[in-house]
Image: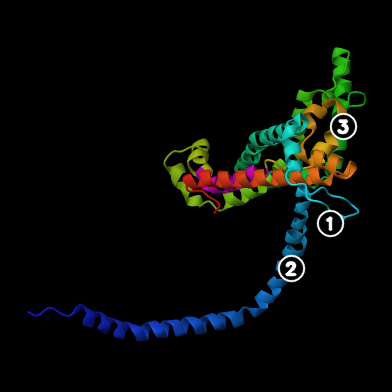
Amino acid sequence: MSEANPSSTSAMINQKASPVKTKSNWLVRKYGKRVLKQNIPLYIMFVPVILFYLIFKYYPMTGLVIAFKKYSFIKGIWGSPWAGLDSFKMIFQTKQNFNIIWNTLKLSGLSIIIGFPIPIILALLLNEVRKLQIKRLVQTLVYLPHFLNWVIVGGIVVTVFSQSTGTLNHVIEKMFGESYPFLYKEFSWITIYLTSGVWKEAGWNAIIYLAALTAIDQSLYEAASIDGANRWQQTIRITLPAITPTIIILLILKIGHLMELGFDQVYVLQNNAVLEVSEVISTFIYKIGIQQANFSLATAMGLFESLVGLILVLSANRIARHFGQGLW
C-alpha cells in the first residue's frame, strides 16, 4: 500500500474546513452587530454610571498627589513643590503615628473577632423561630439601631454610662457607694465601643445571612430529620455549610476594611482620658488635616490606609481560593 502524502492530506482538510470557518466568522460578526444594536439603549443607560464613577470616584483620586507634595493653599495642588516621600517617612518615624496605626488595627481586629460571628448566630437563631409574629417583632427590634445616627447612639451611651448622670452609675452608686468612670477607663471604653457597634449593626448585617438561609433546600432538613438528626446536628451539617460561601465573601470584604475603622463611632465616643487607645487613623486624619491644615500628612496616612486595605483584601481572597471559596 502506498502511504498518503501528508502535505496533500493537510491541504484537503484545509479546503474542507475553510468554508465552515468563514461561515462561522460571518455568523459571529452578524450576530455581534445585531446584539450591539439591540443593546444600544442599555449602553446609553450605562453612560451616566460610567460618568458618575469617572467624575466623582476616579477624578478626585488625582488629589492623592498631595501626599507627595508640600501642599500650599496659595499655590494649589499642581503648583505646590514636590516633597517626595517625606510625609510617609514622617508616618513611620513618629511614635505617635505607630500608636495610631496600632490602635486602628487593634479596634478593627476586635470588631471583626467579636462583631463578625454575632450576625451569623443571630440569623441562625431567627431562622429557628417558628412563630412568624415573634420572628418579625425580633427582626424589627434588631434592625432599628442601624437607622440611628452615631450622634444619637453616642448620646444613648453617655446617658447610660456617664459617671455623673448615667443610669447605670446611679444603680452602682446606690449599691456600692461610689460611681465608676466607664467612659474614662481604657478597658471599659473599648468594651463599650465594641458592644455599641455590635448593638447597632448586628441586626442589619444578619439580613444577608437570613437571605442565604432561605435558599437552602428544605428537603435536606426533611431527609436529615428522617435519619434522626436533631436541630443542632442539622445546623452543623446542613445550614452552616450552605451559608459558608456567603460567610467567606463577607469576611473578605470585612478584612478589606480592617484599616478603615470609620470616623463617626470613634469620634463620638472619644475623650481625652482614653486618647491613648482611641486615637485612630480616621480621627487623626480629621485632626491633622482639617484642624491643623497639614493636608500632605493626612493624605499620606489615608493612602497608606488604602494600600494596606488592598493588600489585606488580596491576601484574604488568596487564602479563600485555597479552600475553593475565593471572591474572584
Q: Is residue 275 left or right of residue 214?
A: right
Q: Considering the image in quadrants, where does the N terminus appear?
A: bottom left
Residue at (81% x, 38% y) in the render: 284
Looking at marks 1 and 2 on the same chain, the residue that comes earlier in the sequence is marked by 2
- Would you place residue 199 above or below residue 326 in this image? above
| Camera-side residue of 102 and 27 | 102
The residue where tag 2 is placed is: 51
Q: Is residue 243 left or right of residue 102?
A: left
Quadrant position of residue 14: bottom left
Bin the neighbour count of mark 3 within 10 Å (Cα to Cα): few under 14, some 14-19, many 20 and up. Answer: some
Magenta-colored span: 241-257
Residue type highlighted by circle 2 = Leu
Q: Mark 3 touching mark 1, by CB under 8 A?
A: no
The residue where tag 1 is placed is: 79
Report x, y in % for residue 27.
Answer: 46, 84
Residue at (79% x, 49% y) in the render: 69
Can residue 261 be seen from the camera position used here?
no
* Mark 3–mark 2 distance (CA, rounded to whole Å): 44 Å
* Mark 1–mark 2 distance (CA, rounded to whole Å): 27 Å
Report x, y in % for residue 264.
Answer: 82, 42
| Camera-side residue of 91 and 137 | 91
* Residue farthest to the top, as pictured: 177
| Camera-side residue of 12 and 182 | 12
Nearest to viewer (mark 3 / mark 1): 1
Considering the whole magenta stretch, tell me its main secondary structure: helix
Residue at (85% x, 25% y) in the render: 273
The residue where tag 3 is placed is: 158
